Amino acid sequence: MKKFIGPVSVLVLIILVGVFWWRYYFVFAEGVKAGNLNYFEKKGFIFKTWEGRLVQDGFQSPNPGALQSNEFRFSADGDSLASVLERAGGKFVELRYKEFLNPIPWRGASEYVVTEIIRVENTKNNENFPIK
């Protein structure tokens, strides 16, 4: 019986590590979202992370002839993205993101993590500037 305890405990440990990776580090989806940046802030109790909300207009409403807006809540990956997004409040932005199955505190409060800013557009005079 003692022969099986070692291999079984190693197998259980491998399964637990695999489940943890699957739930918190597996990238479920990647994509681009565009809309007006509503707010962007650094918050958290122990882990201070950058959190924001993008408001997307023009989605069809359940009521005929009406439009409804949709909001996209996200976390930003790093201070370099945050420095640009802090200055983009109220502007039209395009953001590339990764969707994880569950958030973890040091990555952010959202399952969606923005990894790149594709474009920021000044809606007043339509000045565009790409962000690399």
Image (tube, rainbow, N blue to C red):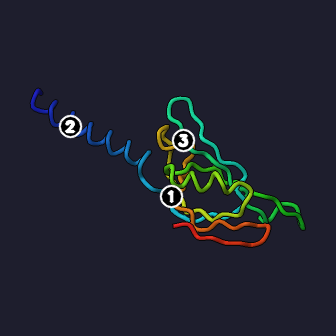
Q: Mark 3 or 1 closer to N-term?
A: 3
- 54 relative position to 82: left or right: right
- The local secondary structure at tag 3 comes to strand
**Outermost residue, left direction?**
3
Q: Position of residue 42 (x, y in %)?
A: 59, 41
Residue receiving disc 3? 49
Separation of residues labelled 3 and 1 (CA atoms): 14 Å
Q: Pointers 1 and 2 in contact (CB under 8 A)?
A: no
- The local secondary structure at tag 1 comes to strand
Q: Position of residue 105 (x, y in %)?
A: 49, 37
Q: Mark 2 or 3 closer to N-term?
A: 2
- Amino acid beneath label 1: Thr
For residue 115, the mark is 1
Q: Position of residue 101 (x, y in %)?
A: 50, 49
* Figure quadrant of the N terminus: top left
Tell me what residue is drawn at x 48 percent, y 57 percent: 28
Picture quadrant where residue 94 is located = bottom right
- The local secondary structure at tag 2 comes to helix
- Amino acid beneath label 2: Val
Residue receiving disc 2? 10
**Outermost residue, right direction?**
65
Which residue is more in the foreground, 49 or 122?
A: 122
